Image: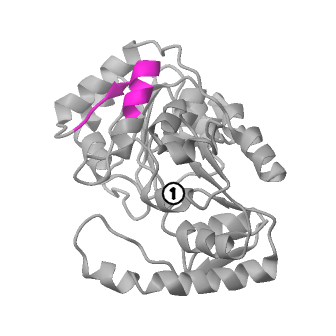
Amino acid sequence: MLYVGSKGGVEKRMIEKIGIPYEGVHCGKLRRYFSWQNFVDVFKVPLGVWAAAGILRRFKPDVVFSKGGFVSFPVCVAAWKLGIPVVLHESDLHLGMANKWIAGIASTICVSFEETIESLPEKLRGKAVYTGTPIRAEILAGDKEAGLGFCGFNDYKPVVLVMGGSSGAEQLNILVRAGMDELLKKYQIVHICGRGKLDISAHSKGYKQFEYLDEQMKDIYAASDVAVTRGGANSLFELAALRKKAVVVPLSMGASRGDQIDNARVFVKDFGWYMLNGDVGREDFINAVNVAFMQNVGSGKVKNGAKEVVDLLIST
């Protein structure tokens, strides 16, 4: 295996940590808002394709697997030009921009939602496969007591997990800190707030904050009774596989292409989760956590596509 990411990307440390070699390429990013950087990044794309072609010639892969994102585009174009089959996987309900561009040259399109296939252009449906999304096996083996001990929590007050992804979510950080005093009367809170976003003044009993969690995440999941999260597909699938109660606060249309809202609606329908969208205030947030804690998790099913995706890569 070889992982190709961006030059100086934050994923480099994570990939090398698990013993997989890493190569970086320059890649342009098309922003969905006006930025002078868009004009500069246009010229990075051909450089990225050229660099990726050199990497692929040296490594001689049998197949290129793409999860989308702006880094994937030059690598997949280079693979196509070199005659190397491309298998892509889309986590969200609808294809992201990079995957839309790559889909036409891909051999196989793996999707996490059955509904995604229906939304594809007819010419692409024949190579689409409903695999579900790959779920990390280790998160299914968490230890509740270890999670409580890691946070210094007791086992008689329920635990609310607030997580905004590896880079954190400013909206969630503001909401949890505004409602902390009220929520701590009933709950304990473990807050993953993102790198550089710790509040050094927050030292309340029953509240524990982290910039980021890795190996401990499985135990934190096990210790949590309610999770508050963005609408990123990977987090939603993991929480659903663990049958957790959840409050989903997706990115708004103004800050995204609406993919998190679309993802959240599917899980709200299938699992009975609570979704907050738009202008969310302190009282809305506290009420949502309380309602979610009282609800039962619905009967929706999650398809773990880990083995199926690997089998497709091998067969390709």
Crowd band around label 1 with a 10 angstrom C-alpha radius: few (<14), some (14–19), many (20+)? many
Residue at horizontal 66%, vertical 76%? 81
- Quick check: 75 left or right of 161? right
Residue 150, located in which quarter of the rendered image? top right
The x and y percentages for residue 289 are 33, 26
Q: Nearest the camera: 207 or 52? A: 52
Q: Which stretch did the figure color magenta? A: 264-277
Q: Which residue is mark 1?
A: 99
Q: Amino acid at mark 1?
A: Asn
Vertical side of 161 occupied by 270: above or below: above
In magenta segment, residue 283: no
The x and y percentages for residue 203 are 36, 47
Vertical side of 242 occupied by 8: above or below: below
The type of colouring in the image is one colour
Residue 206 visible in this rendered orientation of the protein: no
Vertical side of 163 occupied by 246: above or below: above
Q: How many marks?
A: 1
Vertical side of 197 occupied by 121: above or below: above
The N terminus is located in which quarter? bottom right
Q: Nearest the camera: 86 or 48? A: 86
In magenta segment, residue 269: yes
Residue at horizontal 56%, vertical 67%? 72
The x and y percentages for residue 141 are 72, 33
- Quick check: 224 left or right of 266? right
Q: In this view, which residue lies farthest toward the front?
A: 123
Residue 291, located in which quarter of the rendered image? top left
The x and y percentages for residue 310 are 77, 47
Residue 296 visible in this rendered orientation of the protein: yes
Residue at horizontal 44%, vertical 38%? 119
Q: Secondary structure at mark 1?
A: helix
Residue at horizontal 60%, vertical 28%? 241
- Quick check: 292 left or right of 56? left
